[in-house]
């Protein structure tokens, strides 16, 4: 890691810790069947992954869930057009902290469940998830232990479709009568 990356990382972590210390978060588990609102935060850079996320969101909507999407596009291109809310590198400061009205609205939205769908390290998405007002936050392994309440292991070579299947599997397990007895 270069010296510049280390400095950025230091300021990112410091800023996130300060924001987190000022926030009172109400986290709780909720059965997937009765969850009404779901936020999906995802890396929208790749067209194939966008399609997979959109298909998953469509499936959730078919099952009666209110779904809101926020995509992150790793580009500074301004003339992008999607059927969902998104932010780009233009809305991310040098510390890798996203700063836009869309991001703030998504953070303060009280989702029953927030699902983060991306592979690898993604500071802007982890930042939003960490500060989210969602009751339950689900996402891939992150070095930031405050990012998610339910962490999905994503071995090297895993694709986004595998992550989506794992998220769905574990969220549906929360409804399981066996799980309820174990708690």
Image (spheres, rainbow, N blue to C red):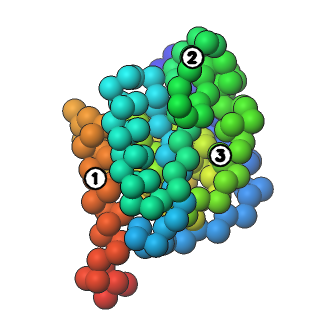
Circles 3 and 2: CB atoms closer than 8 Å: no
**What quarter of the picture does the C terminus occupy?**
bottom left
Q: Write down the residue under mark 3.
A: 106
Q: In the drawing, does residue 22 fall left or right of residue 140?
A: right
Query: Which residue position is annotated with label 1?
Result: 166
Badge 2 is on which residue?
80
Above-or-below relation of 180 to 136: below
Horizontally, is 113 left or right of 103 in the view?
left
Helix, strand or loop at mark 1: helix
**77 is higher (above) or lower (below) than 109:** above
State which tag comes first along the sequence, 3 or 1. Answer: 3
Q: Residue at x 22, y 33 (%)?
A: 157
User: Pointer 1: residues within 10 angstroms few (<14), some, or many (20+)?
Assistant: some
Q: Alpha-carbon distance for marks 3 and 2?
A: 19 Å
Residue lying at 30% horizontally and 69% vertically, measured from the top left: 173
User: Is residue 151 visible from the viewing direction of this image?
Assistant: no
Q: Residue 16's x, y, as percent?
A: 67, 43
For the residues marked 2 and 1, what is the alpha-carbon distance in whole angstroms?
Answer: 30 Å
| Front residue (pair 146, 91) | 91
* N-term-proximal mark, 2 vs 1: 2
Q: Residue at image x 66%, y 32%?
A: 98
The answer, for residue 167, to whether it is visible in the render is yes
Where residue 152 appears, x then y in whole percent? Answer: 34, 52
Local packing at callout 2 (Cα closer than 10 Å; few below 14, some 14-19, many 20+) is few
For the residues labelled 3 and 1, say whether their Cβ atoms are less than 8 Å apart: no
Marks 3/1: CA distance? Answer: 24 Å
């Amino acid at each position: 890691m270069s010296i510049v990356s280390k400095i950025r990382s230091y300021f990112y972590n410091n800023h996130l810790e300060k924001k987190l210390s000022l926030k009172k978060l109400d986290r709780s588990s909720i059965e997937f069947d009765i969850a009404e609102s779901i936020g999906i935060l995802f890396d929208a850079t790749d067209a194939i992954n966008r399609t997979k996320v959109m298909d998953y969101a469509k499936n959730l909507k078919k099952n009666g869930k209110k779904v809101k999407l926020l995509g992150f596009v790793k580009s500074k291109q301004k003339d992008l057009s999607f059927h969902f809310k998104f932010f780009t590198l233009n809305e991310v400061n040098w510390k890798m902290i996203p700063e836009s009205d869309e991001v703030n609205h998504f953070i303060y939205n009280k989702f029953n469940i927030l699902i983060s769908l991306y592979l690898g390290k993604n500071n802007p998405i982890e930042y939003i998830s960490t500060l989210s007002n969602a009751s339950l936050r689900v996402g891939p392994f992150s070095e930031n232990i405050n990012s998610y309440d339910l962490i999905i292991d994503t071995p090297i070579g895993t694709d986004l479709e595998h992550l989506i299947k794992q998220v769905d599997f574990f969220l549906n397990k929360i409804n399981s009568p066996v799980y309820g007895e174990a708690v």
